Amino acid sequence: MTQTLEEATAREAPVPARGVPPDLAALADHDLLAAGLVDQVVANRANARVWARLVEFHSRRTADEGVRRTVSLHFALTPRQATVAEVAELWGWKASWARKQLNVALCLSVWFPQVWEMCLKGQLDVHRAQMIADTARFKLGDDLSWLALGKRLQPWLEGHLRSVDALLPDGSPAPAVVGCTDRQLRNKLDYEVRRLSPAPSEQAHRKAVEDRAVRRSDPADGTGVGWLGVSHTVDQLMLAEQALTLAARQLRDGGDERTLDQLRADIAVDRLVGRADGVATPSFARPVINVTVPVQTVMGVCDDPGVLSGGQVIPAGLARAIAADPSSTWYRMLVDPAGEMVELSTRSYQPTDPIWRHVVAEWGGCFRPGCGEPATSADIDHRTPFPGGATSTSNLWPACEEDHKVKHAPGFVVSQDAKTGDFVMHTPSGFAHRLPRPSHPACDWDVDLPPAVQISGSELLHALHHVIECRESDLACRPEVEWELGPATHEADLIRQAIDHAGHGEALVRPSDLGV
């Protein structure tokens, strides 16, 4: 006799864990977890109110600073000093911590009003909010950039509000909280910083590439095991890691009992010292990275960054370097007139190479929003199991090993919202989690070349490499703008023709796009 998961769990009386309050032990699974959302919101609000108290106290000390200076000009504390002096001892904080919390609270309340409001509502925790403030304070140098960052972040944070169609034990709807991971938020912040401040980001990238090195760390704990680290561009490190993993799996499939981590370490050392016979990467599983980048970046007419599979942001210069690498293979995804990617399918269980590339490019990473596994190293999973579901781009998505198992576990069901088209995962405890399709990087600056001039991306890149000097600071593409290009080439002539046809007041390229 078979029974459902709900029937099996209903017959088992809950066993209270040691230290768990009795009122929690008596709750059903759904109510136990749903009420935890309320606990998070309450904690987030409480922490935000601590920040709000710092801001209010600081504003009062700012208001009476003049009076205090008339009493004692030499010993009068600044509003910041007065706030830290009062708070540190009373709240049991170190002075440095109190100063940092005040700086973060002031930054958020003044320059990130949308983020500040989400904190006060309990939707955003202080840890993620502090990441936003620290990014602005240390990576963006002017107030206008802070405001622009806040406006760009607002829709993204709202898109990561995890709301579930569930009721709390008291009958009220479950609250929504921001559910992005730290890694996802860092990637988003890095992407926006590079868009708002491309020149310093490119300079930092070039400096980091120049400083690439190998470092050895000797053991300090007496274990006799140390570390050997390599600093290089992230695309090359991803390729190296995948090559080690594929070779390690080949040995595991052959019966080697070492773990994947042990095999990767041993293979890396064996290859470096010349003992790598018989552990070559299988030819059928060449390591692959996937870069999604606006075509304008590849052409060199904008400096928007690219994104590696898994969400890692790379600067425009690195994206162009990858594009120029003769060993790189680039694929342009086919789209219909509405901008949707054209569906591909096969009758076999195993997806074809074009289908694999399509799925990897569309999703970027594991289907679960909170997972950071790159699509290039994840399984390609049939959303509706084969053969009931087709091997097509509309029925496939990447799934890491753990989430792949969870999706097929008893009680977990995936459905599609008829209104939004988003996918929803239903859990055994009665929750429904939205699984939206990921967004892709796109340049919001359109470049309309004159119809009489056709320039390919490679031609434009080649020509821009020969730019030596531009004698106008604003490159407005007026006829009197004087360019000096390198040796006469077909590509350079095309650029001159484009400038001649651009007309008065029409900007074809900007100084920042050329690095001048």
Image: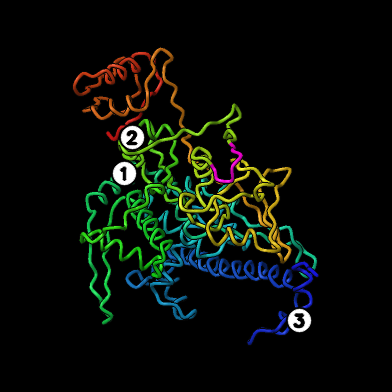
Please report contact status of discs 3 and 1: CB closer than 8 Å, yes or no. Answer: no
Helix, strand or loop under label 3: loop
Is 367 left, or right, of 34 in this rendering?
Answer: left
Residue farthest to the bottom, as pictured: 18
**Residue for badge 3:** 13
Q: Position of residue 425 (x, y in %)?
A: 67, 56
- Looking at the picture, does residue 82 appear above or below residue 141? below
The C terminus: image quadrant: top left
Asked whether residue 230 is in view, the answer is: yes
Position of residue 497 measured from the top left corner of the image (x, y, whole percent)? 32, 14
| Residue hosting label 2 | 512
Q: Of marks 3 and 2, which one's residue comes earlier in the chain?
A: 3
Q: Is 44 left, or right, of 198 in this rendering? A: right
- Which residues, given as a range, are shown in magenta? 345-351
Residue found at x 32% / y 24%: 459
- Coordinates of residue 506 in the picture (x, y in percent): 41, 20
Indicate the quadrant where residue 117 lies.
bottom right
Amino acid found under the numbered disc labelled 3: Ala
Residue 202, disc: 1
The crowd level at tag 3 (other Cα within 10 Å; few <14, some 14-19, many 20+) is: few
Task: For marks 2 and 1, give the CA distance.
Answer: 11 Å
Q: Please name which of the two marks, 2 or 1, marks the residue nearer to the observer.
A: 1
Dot 1: element? helix
| Magenta span: chief secondary structure | loop
For marks 2 and 1 on the same chain, the one whose residue lies earlier in the sequence: 1
Q: Residues within 10 Å of mark 1 (few under 14, many from 20)?
A: many
Q: Residues within 10 Å of mark 2 (few under 14, many from 20)?
A: few
